[in-house]
Image (cartoon, grey):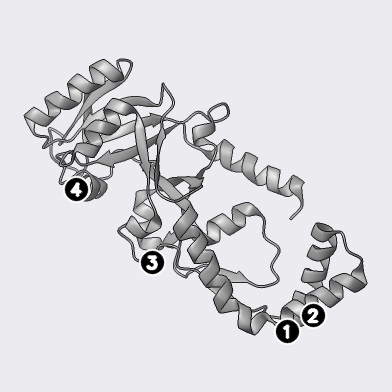
């Protein structure tokens, strides 16, 4: 992939990035309170997620050997700067070894993801009545609203939307893919049934799970679950007053009329 096309893809993602993203938290562990105090969020391995199909991609050989050989030659000439004769020889050698290398290649890629890659997962939605019970412990937790700076804040630069599909993504040998496409097919594709989460992932490629400090203005509001424990609510309020004084506090509640399945948020 040529650099110009890659840059355009990045610009498209940045332009589509919401100004606000949300994360649901349970208050049954000390982690959430510590996160609010320190401003450090946890980037998890996909092995810790609740979906066993995370990073479930297929590695396949090229559908058409002749076309694959031509694509390989083009890529090698562009990326390695070799002439067409040498590129052809290299492509033929790779195709001969393809049968033996596909399984090893997938295992190596999975190992790289498992040992190096971690993610901070968020949602475009604050009012999803499935995510409140799933991730905020039956509406007793909170939902944190994050400011997402589109340009100047490095923390959000590697925030990508999850894509949803009825079939697992395929990586074919010989395909010419830029970094964005590699990321999408390996760690940013989930089954369509998960689409209600409208998920975004901030990616870190270092040494696996880690904590990273949020920007100083990152938290813009906290929504209290409609069944939050009063003592835990007071802890949250005290921490927010001390560490995030600019943030607003909202309370989730069921609508007064009760004629729709929805949540309302009241500023306090």
Which numbered dot is residue 96? 1
Which numbered dot is residue 53? 3
- For disc 1, the neighbor class at 10 Å (few under 14, some 14 to 19, many from 20) is few
Question: Is residue 79 in sight in this rendering?
Answer: yes
Of labels 3 and 2, the one closer to you: 2
- Against 161, is 98 above or below? below
Q: Position of residue 203 (x, y in %)?
A: 49, 46
Q: In the structure shown, which secondary structural element does the residue marked by tag 3 occupy?
A: loop
Which numbered dot is residue 133? 4
Of labels 2 and 4, the one closer to you: 2
Q: Position of residue 15 (x, y in %)?
A: 58, 36
Image quarter where the N terminus lies is bottom right
Question: Is residue 268 in sight in this rendering?
Answer: no
Q: Nearer the viewer, residue 38 or 180?
A: 38
Q: Position of residue 70 (x, y in %)?
A: 81, 73
Mark found first going from the N terminus, 4 or 3: 3
Reading the image, the residue beneath label 2 is 92
Q: Position of residue 135 (x, y in %)?
A: 24, 47
Mark found first going from the N terminus, 3 or 1: 3
Which numbered dot is residue 113? none
Q: Is mark 1 in CB contact (under 8 Å) with mark 2? A: yes
Residue drawn 13% across the image and 28% down it: 233
Q: In the structure shown, which secondary structural element does the residue marked by tag 2 occupy?
A: helix
């Amino acid at each position: 992939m040529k650099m110009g096309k890659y840059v355009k893809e990045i610009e498209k993602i940045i332009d589509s990035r919401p100004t606000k993203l949300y994360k649901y938290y349970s208050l049954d562990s000390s982690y959430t309170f510590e996160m609010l105090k320190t401003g450090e969020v946890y980037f998890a391995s996909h092995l810790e997620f609740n979906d066993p199909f995370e990073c479930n991609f297929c590695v396949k050989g090229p559908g058409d050997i002749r076309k694959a050989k031509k694509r390989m030659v083009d890529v090698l000439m562009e990326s390695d700067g070799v002439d067409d004769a040498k590129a052809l020889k290299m492509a033929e050698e790779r195709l001969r070894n393809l049968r033996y290398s596909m399984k090893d290649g997938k295992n190596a890629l999975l190992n790289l993801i498992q040992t190096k890659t971690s993610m901070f997962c968020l949602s475009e939605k604050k009012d999803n009545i499935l995510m409140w019970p799933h991730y905020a412990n039956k509406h007793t937790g909170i939902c944190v609203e994050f400011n997402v700076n589109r340009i100047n804040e490095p923390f959000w630069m590697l925030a990508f939307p999850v894509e949803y599909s009825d079939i697992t993504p395929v990586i074919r040998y010989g395909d010419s893919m830029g970094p964005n496409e590699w990321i999408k097919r390996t760690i940013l594709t989930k089954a369509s049934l998960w689409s209600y989460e409208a998920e975004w992932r901030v990616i870190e490629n270092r040494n696996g799970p880690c904590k990273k400090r949020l920007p100083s203005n990152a938290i813009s509001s906290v929504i209290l679950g409609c069944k939050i424990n009063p003592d835990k609510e007071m802890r949250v309020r005290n921490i927010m007053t001390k560490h995030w004084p600019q943030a607003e506090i909202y309370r989730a509640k069921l609508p007064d009329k009760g004629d729709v399945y929805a949540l309302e948020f009241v500023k306090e």
